[in-house]
Amino acid sequence: MCGIAGIAFQDPSRPARQAVLTRMTAIMRHRGPDGEGYHLAPGIGLGMCRLSIIDTITGDQPMANETGSVVVICDGEIYNYLELRERLLPRGHHLRTRSDVEVIAHLYEDDPDGFLRELRGMFALALWDARMRRLLLVRDRLGIKPLHYAITAEGLVFGSELKAVLASGAVAPSRDGRALRELFALGFVRAPRTMVAEVRRLLPGQWLRFESGKVTTGRYWDVTFPARRDYDRSIGADAWAALLRDGLTEAVRLHLRSDVPVGAWLSGGVDSSAVTALASRELGQPLPTFSLGFDDPAVDEMSGCRTLDVFPEYRLQSHRVQCGAEHAELLGKSVWHREQPFGLGVAIPRLLLSALAAKHVKVVLAGEGADEILGGYPWYGADRVLSLLAGWPAPVRALVGRVLARRWPGAGRILAGPQTLDLERFATLIGSAGRQVPQDLFVLADGEPEELKLPDVFRSWHPFAQLQYLDIKLRLADSVIPHIDRPSMAHSLEVRVPFLDHVLVELCSAVPPWVKMRGLREKHVLRRAMQGILPAEICWRKKIALSAPTRDLLAGARLWEREARSHGPFASACVARLVAQHRQGRADHGRLLLLIGTTLAWEEQFLRIPRSIEP
């Protein structure tokens, strides 16, 4: 695990300056405080800062093959590196370390076009082929690790984080107005865009090649689903549960590979409890767990329910941290590490949880990803129920929506919007469209979010699978995962997500929707799989989504109020109106005001101050 950065020049003879690479890696030292390494040659410069997890003694990067013609830097972990080593050694390869990264260089030697298919893990890597004078950038299949880049007149610059690319000095940053509009429409910015117009992100499962001054990109993996009529009906629900249990057990076993202590993030839900229980069973020794609570009982999922750490048979070492309004002071730090404005208050609680875990371990396992690969969010049930009304005339749907709105405010918007799944319906289902952004909020004029590109076979899938695809490709990669990676790496903590092992994801994509959700019981197949492993009260507990006291955080930060008079993308009169309505209790603009405030804070940090200075 580390932060990676580099520069490749159009001019193959131009030397890279280590001072620039040092500046790029130093600004993200939090990702790798244990060491640093560089590779400089005509036309290329690579740098990294290392968090030592596997082979802590000889595993320093960059890594190279025997001749030094292939050089690799990698952020993340290759979980099947031991199996890959055993396959490489009989082929005559000489591996000098026990590092998981070294196998990448040798796999590339054997099969430059197909080596990525062999890798099982979370990774963002850069590979320099000196013989071909080719730079290859790659992001893992689910986008667990980030990778940013910018194409300039002089070449290509890249880094794990946006701030590393800006620290290169190769880019004069400006706000991407279209990305800002998308942020307020969806709650996040879709890759490849970032909030900086000149910087892009690699997509999950994508590679980028820079060779002879030209840039090409391609996909090496994408999640897919059977056609609606092609699900295997010969496999019963119990058999699917057994397959899921075996698949998750294997994924957890691989994710426990580490030369440093490992712990687990634990909540009251079935996802993190499943990972924790299986990890404890695999280790055969006490496992440290880290849990998050809130002063506000309305958003505290730990309140009033027993969690796995109170059951002595699991031998868990429990550690807990409480989040309150006083932690609003961390909002600026949250924006700095998230590198994007946000309207959900989970960034601060995740910083607190990561800080707690980092005092005890370097690695934790987490339960994120289960809701995406098994369809566990509330909008799956909502879509199932409301899609029954899709064929009704629009006036009738509107009437039903008004009736339902008394107890289900989002129903009216869903029924009034598109009835086939597209970006607008997806945004409405997940609640983003509920922000009701005022027309006069922005003082800039930019277009609406770009059209959603879907696979040719998308419409042949079951509606449940279509929704899963958008969850995995959009919300997971661009919202959920960054809220894991950035707060954890801010404290030099590696978070591993076994549910996002791509082999397990492919297994779950074959599970029929009616097995994943029984009636309106979300993740029924996972609950069935964990019977006998988890206590029944946890196994069958109703889902409680991670939330945060946005109102308390706003009250503590006063961020929108401080910045409302500043010059920026927002109309001050509109912001003042929203603040007044929110204060007087006439409307709850908490998420919208948090988006406004964090946008202004982001501009201060990334567009207006020296990029090498952390707040």
Image (cartoon, helix red, strand yellow):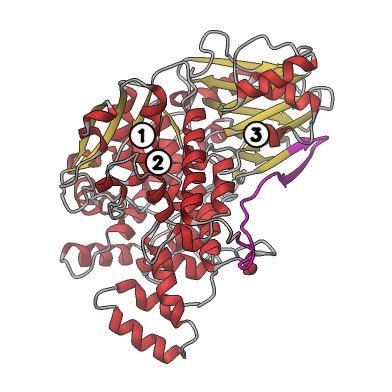
The residue lying toward the viewer, choosing from 116 and 586, is 116
Residue 157 badge: 3
Q: Position of residue 560 (x, y in %)?
A: 29, 53
Q: Quadrant of residue 439?
A: bottom left
Q: Quadrant of residue 260?
A: top left
Q: What whole-number distance in Å separates the C-alpha atoms at marks 2 and 3?
A: 34 Å
The three-letter code of the residue at mark 2 reads: Gly
Residue on which the image places disc 2: 367
Q: Relative to residue 444, is residue 538 drawn left or right?
A: left
Closer to the eye: label 3 or 1: 1
Q: Is mark 2 in CB contact (under 8 Å) with mark 1? A: yes
Helix, strand or loop at label 3? It is strand
Closer to the eye: label 2 or 1: 1
Q: What whole-number distance in Å separates the C-alpha atoms at marks 3 and 1?
A: 39 Å
- Name the residue located 56 percent from the left edge and 53 percent from the top edge: 509
Q: Is mark 3 in CB contact (under 8 Å) with mark 1? A: no
**Where 556 sits versus 430, above or below?**
above
Q: Main secondary structure of the magenta part?
A: loop
Q: Position of residue 333 (x, y in %)?
A: 34, 36
Helix, strand or loop at label 2? It is loop
Q: Quadrant of residue 323?
A: top left
The three-letter code of the residue at mark 3 reads: Val
| Sequence-earlier tag: 3 or 1 | 3
Q: Is mark 2 in CB contact (under 8 Å) with mark 3? A: no
Q: Relative to residue 409, is residue 431 drawn left or right?
A: right
The residue lying toward the viewer, choosing from 603 and 241, is 241
Residue on which the image places disc 1: 276
Q: Residues within 10 Å of mark 2 (few under 14, many from 20)?
A: many
Q: Which residues are magenta?
A: 209-231
Q: For residue 37: magenta?
A: no
| Sequence-earlier tag: 2 or 1 | 1
Helix, strand or loop at label 1? It is helix
